[in-house]
Image (tube, rainbow, N blue to C red):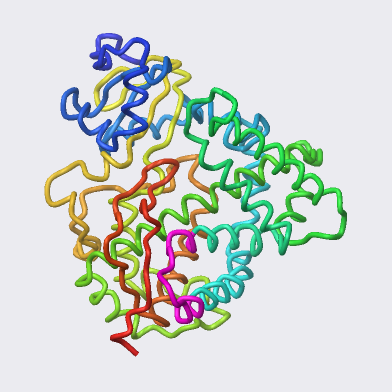
Amino acid sequence: MVNPRLPSVPNTGAISGILEGFSFLGNPAFAKKRFEKHGNIFETSLFGQPMVFVQGSQAISDLLSNPNAIDGWWPRSVQQLLGSHSLANRNGAAHKARRRAVAQLFSASALQDYSPGIIKMVEDLAEELKCATRPIPLAERMRCFAFSVIASSVLGLEGTDRDELFLDFEIWTKALFSIPIALPGSPFAKALKARNRLLMRLQKLLSQSGNFNGGLDLLSRSSDEAGIPLTDEDIVEQLLLLLFAGYETTASALSCLMRELLVNPSVERWLRDELDQLYWPPDPQSSSHAYDQSNAPRLNAVVNEVMRLTPPVGGFFRRTKLPVVIDGILVPENRVVQVALISSNRHGIGDLDTFRPQRHIDNDCPVKLIPFGDGERVCLGKSLAELEIRLMVVGLFRKVRLALTPNQDLSLRQLPSPIPRDGLLVEVDEKYP
């Protein structure tokens, strides 16, 4: 029984939420400033949507330890662009059934099967960098790499099918966290049209029986809890979610990791001391775990620190079905709650605004990291993303030494995921063999 005498959630006083909404979209310090004023939990309004923000280990634990009292939730723009059949927009039994179907794509044996293709893509990128005669936007290459992994290695798409999907997917992704008003020429209107083209292409592929393989074939044969085959419409909306979850966030994590190493040469040297002792390419039988924490602790520390300082998703959402006590505050039912990861990851004592991977080896990190979410809705592609990141870092840094092109903007654009504004322009450092 929840004690009704508990204090209520502090409120910013915003009513329409228009100014709050634009501030949220444009100011990375939006949540931090309000946490400093109100404490670890506050309520505001974003474009008319009441929203409770929480930070800190206790608040997050209180929220996620009540799975029967919360549901998944996404902003209206995401809901519309993902679709009503999408795993992300479902709850209860429908969510669990489709989650089991999609989870098959990320099993240990599946990751082992994907590894050779991922290694080949890393090798190809290293050769491209070596042969380049002008600076290359590394962030763009990370996006192409991450999309190719999920589209080719996981879903079995190749050639024109993959390339056409990528062009529309870039348009679609850019409007996921936007104002969901389809004014002519607006990002959201363009994204809706791109979504229709994506669905048509995926449905066409599904209709070509025997002409596809990999995860696309696996999903097409999946069934829900009642044993009823998933409809084509259901399948293609799961594919949209897979493409986004396996592409946008991984590309962001890779771009931010490369950026941190290139602007922190002392950390890069520290990491290279370990990478130089690792074998590349890894043995085919162990490639899916060759560079895990036990074999590459410094690499693991760098990945964790990037995920802490610049998580690929700034937060995730839940909706309360029942009253929940969060950090001693009573949150009523039917409230949307955002777990503010960026603020939480810098909340505590010490130099938490500094990029220092060594803290994860010295057990000096007071923050519980959940860059892929937690609880019943933890990201299904977590293991694949970690595998991609580790293979890319080891393979690329064993093959080439990179230098930043001068006079570029290295600040991060935050939405839909952090990425360097000028694309992280790099060239091979000729000072090294």
Residue 424, image x, y percentages: 37, 61
Using the rendered image of the protein, determine whether residue 212 is visible from the camera's viewpoint: yes
Quadrant where the N terminus is found in the figure: top left
Asked if residue 184 lies left or right of residue 327, the reply is right
Residue 44, image x, y percentages: 32, 18
Quadrant where the C terminus is found in the figure: bottom left
Work out which residue is located at the far left of the displayed protein and give it.
350
Using the rendered image of the protein, determine whether residue 91 is visible from the camera's viewpoint: no
Asked if residue 230 lies left or right of residue 100, the reply is right
Question: Majority secondary structure of the magenta segment?
Answer: helix
> Toward the viewer: 241 or 169?
169
Q: Quadrant of residue 375?
A: top left
Q: Quadrant of residue 64?
A: top left
The answer to whether residue 354 is above or below residue 190 is below
Residue positioned 27% across, 61% down in the render = 407
User: What is the magenta range?
Assistant: 126-142
Residue positioned 49% across, 65% down in the render = 388
Residue positioned 57% across, 80% down in the render = 285
The answer to whether residue 134 is above or below residue 230 is below
71 inside magenta stretch: no
The answer to whether residue 188 is above or below residue 387 is above
> Toward the viewer: 324 or 110?
110
Q: Quadrant of residue 347?
A: top left
Residue 179, image x, y percentages: 48, 26
Q: How many marks on residues?
A: 0
Asked if residue 109 lies left or right of residue 26, the reply is right
Residue 59, image x, y percentages: 29, 32
The answer to whether residue 399 is above or below residue 117 is below
